[in-house]
Image (cartoon, rainbow, N blue to C red):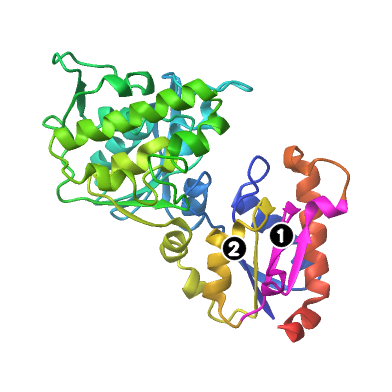
Amino acid sequence: MRVLIAPDKFKGSLSAAEVAAHLASGLADAGVDSDMLPLADGGDGSIDAAAAAGFSRVECSVRDALGRRHRAAIAIRQNTAVVELAGTCGLATLPPGQLAPIQASSHGFGEALVHAVRSGARTLVLALGGSASTDGGVGMLAALGFQFRDDRGRLLDPSAGNLGRIHTVDSTRAVDLEDIDVVVATDVISPLLGGTGAAAVFGPQKGATGNQIAELEAGLRNFTEAARRSGWTDAEDIAVSAGAGAAGGCGFAAALLGADLVSGADFFLDLLGFDHHLSGTDMVITGEGRLDDQTLAGKLPAAVLQRAALLPVVAVVGRDELRSDRERFVAIHAVADLTDVDTASDRIRTSELLRVIGARIGRSLPLVTQRA
């Protein structure tokens, strides 16, 4: 029998490729062959998943969330480039234990986009996740050549703190994306503005206080009005659309560039050839760091379930908190159920237990497929 191992990352612990490799090792111990297809949903880990699927990893120098130069990577195959916000200027680029809700910028992400364009990419896949900033994407746009001015025509620093001062948005010096397809791949459906928007929902996760959230919300609203005033007549409609609030408003900024917003999970399943890998497969193993009721609302394991159709699907996760629709998986294995250690921060122990789980699945494979 043949098993397809197609997990997302275990955030903060192991990459999707590492999760797949340890499960494959356990399956092999039980005498079961497997194919590995590390996946992503548009968040952090997208570059790793693309590289594992045959994209070339290309390094570039960009600014991190606080403006310090560092090396990041994009993934390129033929004329398609995957650019990930998390690895360029996301939370992971901040000093340990430090958050910067006002100072953090998306500028480094824009620099990576410029590098992809100069490398010959004709399709840009924007993987929005793991953001440290709520700057409405002005940092990203500035790296692409946009300029922002106040009501007296003075040039403004493109920052979250200046969102409330922007009066006009000037794209005349911007990188030409006329013949380039821009796709935003994300599982975030929040709009830019309002109680379910970028500042209200994700601001606290980035360290914003109540007053800062109010400041950011007002700034994002002003930025929307400035964009409308500057020629984007549909800016207010974009601001309240699903996904505009992704990555602190980079979804909104990408829409100003003409980007199409798609389900990150489904897009990466297509990009990485998931349906092709199903051929000859008897069972699929998927998973992520935490399985909960949000998972089945559109995250990667839910997309795998839908694509796998009648094939049995087993979930292997770091922690199992799913309360409903558990029967959609023929089995659920959680690393946390096998130890008292916090495996979210223990890579070695997580790796060991994934091999144990892989072997258990391999030994129970005939029973699992009968249940399906």
Label drawn at residue 322: 1
Q: Amino acid at mark 1?
A: Leu
**Earlier residue among tags 2 and 1:** 2
Q: Is residue 195 left or right of residue 192?
A: right
Q: Residue at x 84, y 54 (%)?
A: 337
Mark 1 lies on a secondary structure that is loop
Q: Amino acid at mark 2?
A: Leu
Along the line of sight, the residue nearer the viewer: 253 or 30 = 253
Along the line of sight, the residue nearer the viewer: 79 or 290 = 290
Q: Is residue 277 above or below residue 224?
A: below
Q: Residues within 10 Å of mark 1 (few under 14, many from 20)?
A: some
Q: Whole-percent x and y of residue 294?
A: 60, 56
Q: Which residues are magenta?
A: 311-338
Q: Residues within 10 Å of mark 2 (few under 14, many from 20)?
A: some
Q: Quadrant of residue 221?
A: top left
Report if residue 61 is visible in the image.
Answer: no
Q: Residue at x 51, y 39 (%)?
A: 201
Q: Is 321 one of the magenta-colored residues?
A: yes
Instruction: State the quadrant of the N terminus.
Output: bottom right
Mark 2 lies on a secondary structure that is helix
Q: Residue at x 68, y 70 (%)?
A: 325
Q: Whole-percent x and y of residue 142?
A: 26, 27
Q: Is 102 one of the magenta-colored residues?
A: no
Label drawn at residue 296: 2
Q: Is residue 6 left or right of residue 117?
A: right
Q: Whole-percent x and y of residue 333?
A: 77, 62
